[in-house]
Amino acid sequence: MTFLVVGGAGFIGLNVIEELLSSSEQVIALDKSPIPPAAKKFFSKLPGKFTSIQLDVTNAEDVDRVVSGGDVDVIFYGAAITAGAEREISNPLSVFDVNVSGLLNVLEAGCRVPSVKRIINISSGSAYGNGGFGDTGWNDSLDEFGTREDPQTLYAISKYTGERVALRMGELLKKRVINVRLSAIFGRWEYDTGVRDTLSAPMQATLLALKGETALMDRKEQRDWTYSRDVARALYKLANHENINSSLYNISSGKSWSVFDWCAVLKMFYPDFNYRLCEFGEVPNINLFGTRDRIKMSPDRFLGDIGYTLSANLSEIFEDFKMWLNESAGFWDIEP
């Protein structure tokens, strides 16, 4: 099959491309930014066929030309601007240009191409908004249809809006469109793309470990951190599964753990690395994204329909991640 990965140069996009190429699929990556050279070299060794195209998803004509001319079977929309507060102030329109308008361009083009069987919109657990913290009355694991959303940030609002737009366009144009909400993702191919304002906390700690420095945290959080390679595998399985029973799926390990747990694994391999809570007056060098943690997302619907469980075994995850570090030499330019 031929897969179009929109946002292919981004964190999730690169993981999806790796999974598809490893499975001998044909992949077209579409992104405004180029594929990082180290990733391109890595992908060249995989059995699938890979093409990358640089263009802006907000340009509807360019998007239509690519989608209509590639005999595409499945589209993943992963282009996103993950905005922090500074970007919300300085350039709020850019968040909606990519997260909503760009998505709409791809939906319009994809829904009109007969070869396209399925469009998967890669959304975020951020769409739950304050509902993800129990503020709307839901305190169990977050459920796709039971938890009432209350998005507050521009990123969260744009992702929730994108989901609704995707469903409506699929309904109007008679195409199978599926939204997925990713939990807190970390792992392979994570880097500062220029449109992703903060690396995940586990990867912030990993960079410090590779430099032999100390990770300082202002609290011990608990999140359903989920490994990026498992997410890519889950997305591939969703793309290939014949009977899809839902328009929305959480993709999460469903297990909560702390960056402290990840640091303990890092410490075993990098003895010069240390980690601890901040003492009075110290400034943390790990950003934990706020003062409270989102409730873990329930993976039950995805597990029941698709039959795939995402790992929460940190030792196994780190072994895979360390292998990737060795194989993708140059992707992370680390200076002590």
Image: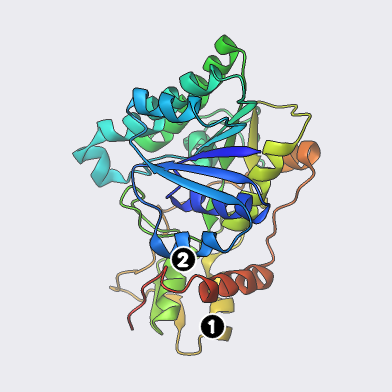
The three-letter amino acid code for the residue at tag 1 is Lys
SS at badge 2: helix
Residue farthest left in this picture: 90
Q: In the image, what residue occupies the spot 46% across and 61% down?
A: 39
**Where in the figure is residue 3, as x and y percent of width and height?**
58, 39
Q: In the image, what residue occupies the spot 63% across and 28% down?
A: 118
**Where in the figure is residue 27, as x and y percent of width and height?**
56, 44
Say if residue 146 shows up in the picture.
yes
Using the rendered view, name the quadrant where residue 18 is placed: bottom right
Mark linked to residue 267? 1
The three-letter amino acid code for the residue at tag 2 is Met
Are discs 1 and 2 less than 8 Å apart at CB?
no
Give the class, few, some or many, for how many residues have Cα within 10 Å of label 2's Cα (few <14, many ≥20): some
Q: Earlier in the sequence, mark 1 or mark 2?
A: 2
Q: Is residue 84 left or right of residue 142?
A: left
- 216 w.r.t. 222: above or below: below
Q: In the image, what residue occupies the spot 32% across and 46% down?
A: 84
Q: CA distance from mark 1 to mark 2?
A: 14 Å
Q: Nearer the viewer, residue 259 or 101?
A: 101
Using the rendered view, name the quadrant where residue 156 is placed: top left
Give the class, few, some or many, for how many residues have Cα within 10 Å of label 1's Cα (few <14, many ≥20): some
Mark linked to residue 203? 2
